[in-house]
Structures are given as C-alpha cells and as structure tokens.
Image (cartoon, helix red, strand yellow):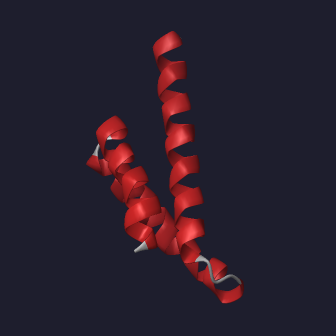
Amino acid sequence: MSLSEHVYPVYDKIVSELGQEALETHLDYVKRKIVDYTDNKKNIVKYLNVAATQYISSRLSMKQMKKGG
C-alpha cells in the first residue's frame, strides 16, 4: 500500500517529465544498489521514495541547466 501512495507517484512524475527510459535507467540503478541497503535497513518504501525523488530532482536540474546554457 505504501508503494502506491509514496513511490509510484514519483515514478509517474519521472515518466511524465523525463520519459520511460529515464525510469528504466533509475530502476536499473536501484536494483544494483539495493542489496547493500536491504542488509542493514528495512524501510524499503522510504529508500525507494528518497532515491526516486533525488533522481528526478537531479535530472530536472540537469535539464534546466542545458536549457539555460
């Protein structure tokens, strides 16, 4: 339930702002890194939410910089 409330809306925003390929790139990254996280921490929803939010913020910042330059 928490995924649908907190994480999926951020994934939808990634797709709408950056495209499906950006979401797939992000999910591939998370899939590679999550093993280290799950060994010590249990709040996977928080991890996914923070990771997706940080990803979209950094990608949108890069997109804005490219437009301005």
Q: Above or below — where is 22 with respect to 50?
A: above
Name the residue located 57 percent from the left edge and 39 percent from the top edge. 58
Instruction: Give the tally of numbered discs.
Output: 0
Which of these two is toward me, 3 or 17? 3
Q: Above or below — where is 60 with respect to 47?
A: above
Quarter of the view holding residue 24: bottom left
Quarter of the view holding residue 4: bottom left
Which of these two is toward me, 43 or 64? 43
Name the residue located 55 percent from the left edge and 20 percent from the top edge. 65
Q: Above or below — where is 19 with respect to 52?
A: above
Which of these two is toward me, 66 or 20? 20
Identity of the residue furthest to the bottom in this view: 39
Identity of the residue furthest to the right in this view: 40
Residue 10: x %, y % from top left:
43, 51
Q: In this view, does 41 lie to the left or right of 45?
A: right
Q: Is residue 13 left or right of residue 65?
A: left
Residue 26: x %, y % from top left:
44, 57
Residue 44: x %, y % from top left:
56, 76
Q: Looking at the rendering, in which quadrant would you find the N terminus?
A: bottom left
Residue 50: x %, y % from top left:
59, 58
Q: Above or below — where is 36 with respect to 51?
A: below
Quarter of the view holding residue 27: bottom left
Name the residue located 35 percent from the left edge and 36 percent from the top edge. 17
Name the residue located 50 percent from the left edge and 67 percent from the top edge. 30
